[in-house]
């Protein structure tokens, strides 16, 4: 094989590997489906389904979801989790407190209050790439979805009592 043919073969093989790598990249999905295929969000996924929010979060959106991890839900007192399991309206209120209308990436966040789908405001702040919402830290920002964006957080947010 001449040097040119060997170089061409090497480039062709590299291109084939690159394309194969692209094929294994997950295709964008809705917020509901993105949460469902993220192992650390299994509790959130169950609660979204229990509350009847799955179809809404599969809808056109766009939405921004601050998604508590399974570890975040483990930190919620058992009595509170039991109350959420028994009261669908309360569960819906808590989950909607984690959702903003529109798509807000980490780069878009400005320190201040923003209105949630639930109706109450949450305090968001950003310092460099460090983003918080209320007292929760965004541990993984800008998980793309076809109908918005998901930010994984380390705490469950509780709406103010009315």
Image (tube, rainbow, N blue to C red):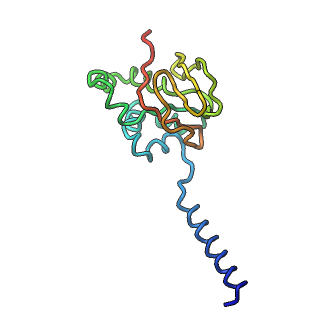
Q: Residue at x 46, y 22 (%)?
A: 135
Looking at the image, residue 135 lies above or below residue 141: above
Query: What residue is shown at x 31% (from left), y 21% (from top)?
Result: 80
Residue 37, percent from left and from top: 44, 47
Quadrant hosting residue 50: top left
* Residue 153 image position (x, y, % from top left): 46, 32
* Quarter of the C terminus within the rendering: top left
The residue lying toward the viewer, choosing from 41 and 155, is: 155
Q: Residue furthest bottom?
A: 1
Give how far across and how far down residue 52 sits, in percent. 43, 32
36 to 117, vertically: above or below: below
Q: Residue furthest top?
A: 162
- Using the rendered image of the protein, determine whether residue 62 is visible from the camera's viewpoint: no
Can residue 38 be seen from the camera position used here?
yes
Residue 18's image quarter? bottom right
Q: Quadrant of the N terminus?
A: bottom right
Count of numbered circles on the image: 0
Give me the residue at 53% from left, 37% from top: 150
Q: Give 46 or 121, whichever is nearer the viewer.
A: 121
23 relative to 95 in the view: left or right: right
**Of 74 and 10, which appears nearest the observer?**
10
Q: Position of residue 74 (x, y in %)?
A: 31, 31
Lateral position of residue 4 relative to residue 79, left or right: right
Task: Please give the name of the residue rendered at 54% of the width and 17% of the height, measured from the top-left corner.
Answer: 121
């Amino acid at each position: 094989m001449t040097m040119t043919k060997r170089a061409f073969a090497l480039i062709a093989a590299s291109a084939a590997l690159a394309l194969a790598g692209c094929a294994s990249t997950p295709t964008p999905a809705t917020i509901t489906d993105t949460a469902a295929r993220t192992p650390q969000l299994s509790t959130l996924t169950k609660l979204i389904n229990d509350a009847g929010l799955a179809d809404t979060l599969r809808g056109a959106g766009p939405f921004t979801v601050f998604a508590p991890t399974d570890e975040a839900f483990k930190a919620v007192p058992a009595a509170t989790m039991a109350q959420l399991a028994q009261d669908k309206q309360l569960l819906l209120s808590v989950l909607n407190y984690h959702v903003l209308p529109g798509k807000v990436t980490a780069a878009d966040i400005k320190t201040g209050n923003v209105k949630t789908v639930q109706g109450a405001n949450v305090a968001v702040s950003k310092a460099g790439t460090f983003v918080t919402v209320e007292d929760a830290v965004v541990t993984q920002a800008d998980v793309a979805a076809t109908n918005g964006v998901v930010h994984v957080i380390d705490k469950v947010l509780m709406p103010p009592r009315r």
